[in-house]
Image (cartoon, grey):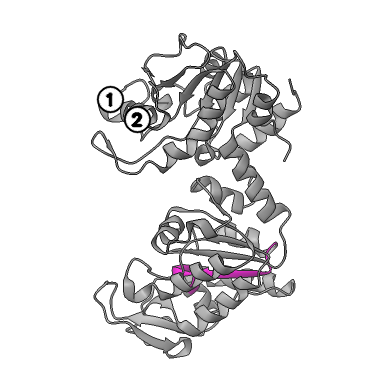
Amino acid sequence: MDILRFSDLCARGQARGRRVFIRADLNVPLDGARITEDTRIRASLPCIRMALDAGAAVMVTSHLGRPTEGVLRPEDSLAPVAARLAELLGREVPLVADWLGGVSVAPGEVVLLENCRVNKGEKRNDPELARQMARLCDIYVNDAFGTAHRAEGTTYGIAEYASVACAGPLLAAEIDALTQALAHPRRPLVAIVAGSKVSTKLTILKSLAGKVDRLIVGGGIANTFMLAAGLPIGKSLAEPALVEEAKAVMAAMAARGAEVPIPTDVVVASEFSAQAPATLKAASAVTAQDMILDIGPETAALLAAQLKSAGTIVWNGPVGVFEFDAFAHGTETIARAIAASPAFSIAGGGDTLAAIARFGIEKDVSYISTGGGAFLEVLEGKTLPAFEILQRRAQLRP
């Protein structure tokens, strides 16, 4: 993907003395004014440090929560984020409210601009707002993959009007990883798509059916595919109305000589509960009272072998209810197989990241995506608005 990279501008000295506007993703979870998890803040540090080291006057903004445009409530303020940024950077990070009229910041300094979604017109990408923000800077940097699927004022509009628009290191790394995994994959390419419903990921399944060599399905999605394969699923979560769609995906894969592996054994319970006794059964032996909550060890071992021989792995979703210890074996086996595989692996989605953290394989996954909805839209085959505008602006290189 042909984009202008902020790192290249810095290396050429083109950021020195310039006013740099960074759109970061600092939308962290809060308990009152206390940040409960700061991964997104830490992920944004390399771009901010890069700009400071390059001698730029640095402005950073982000959304936080779901504020009402035009109204800044205390709970929508980036004040806790500014305090945490100051701790991590070891320097003062002033928080600037009402910043559209102008920002005072000197080269070598950084300020945090208050919640950008409070600005009227941000979400609908109002052109006048975009122009107003573009006038604040010499260089616009998008470093927020988590919002790359949204065409908003700070993710798209400002990039249209800023003198220079480029990708920060975090966004550039996402683009590189996704390109390696989907545009130029080392074969075999194996995708794991799991979740509660086929309907929420049907477009992804159809898109991947034309690209991957194996499509591993899990959770409620797998149950629907089991129905499509003529297997009983008892009272398990599934979408019978989408059985024909599942059959079409399997047929599309088979026509290419690829496959959707169907579980041969499963772990069931009589109810959805961490305390429910777990019972191992052949997939063909599931009764009307059974609820499938995990794949069985035979299926897990087969899938693990396929993952260990893969060239590229794309992982979105755990294959069982891994939050319950009795039903975590399948997801753990998959996770450890990915960790042990020589394949290039990319993982994304909240539940996937939780599974990676639980089984401690963070260092063994080639790339962990920071975006949920954006990651899914890339898997669907969509061109993200942030990617599109940066590619277009790259044709006007400084």
The residue beneath circle 2 is 67
Q: Secondary structure beneath disc 2?
A: loop
Disc 2 to disc 1, C-alpha distance: 8 Å
Pinpoint residue 361: horizontal percent, then vertical percent.
48, 61
Which residue does the image show at 73% across and 75% down from the upper left? 257
Q: Is residue 9 above or below residue 297?
A: above
Sequence-first tag of 2 and 1:
2
Label 2 crowd (10 A; few <14 / some 14-19 / many >=20): some
Query: Would residue 150 appear left or right of 390 to someone viewing this image?
Result: left
- Circle on res. 73: 1
The reply to whether callout 2 and callout 1 are in contact (CB within 8 Å) is yes
Which residue does the image show at 65% across and 73% down from the upper left? 309
Q: Is residue 197 above or below residue 22?
A: below
Q: Quadrant of residue 326?
A: bottom left
Which residue does the image show at 64% across and 70% down from the upper left? 214
Q: Nearer the viewer, residue 359 or 373?
A: 359
Q: Is residue 241 above or below residue 347?
A: below
- Quadrant housing the N terminus: top right
Label 1 crowd (10 A; few <14 / some 14-19 / many >=20): few
- Circle on res. 292: none
Q: Nearer the viewer, residue 143 or 240?
A: 143
Q: Is residue 243 visible?
A: yes
Which residue does the image show at 42% across and 21% down from the upper left? 113
Pinpoint residue 183: horizontal percent, then vertical percent.
72, 52
Q: Secondary structure beneath disc 1?
A: loop
Query: Would residue 213 appear left or right of 322 to someone viewing this image?
Result: right
Q: Which residues are magenta?
A: 211-222
Pinpoint residue 268: horizontal percent, then vertical percent.
36, 81
Please state which amino acid type lies under the numbered disc 1: Arg
Please state which amino acid type lies under the numbered disc 2: Pro
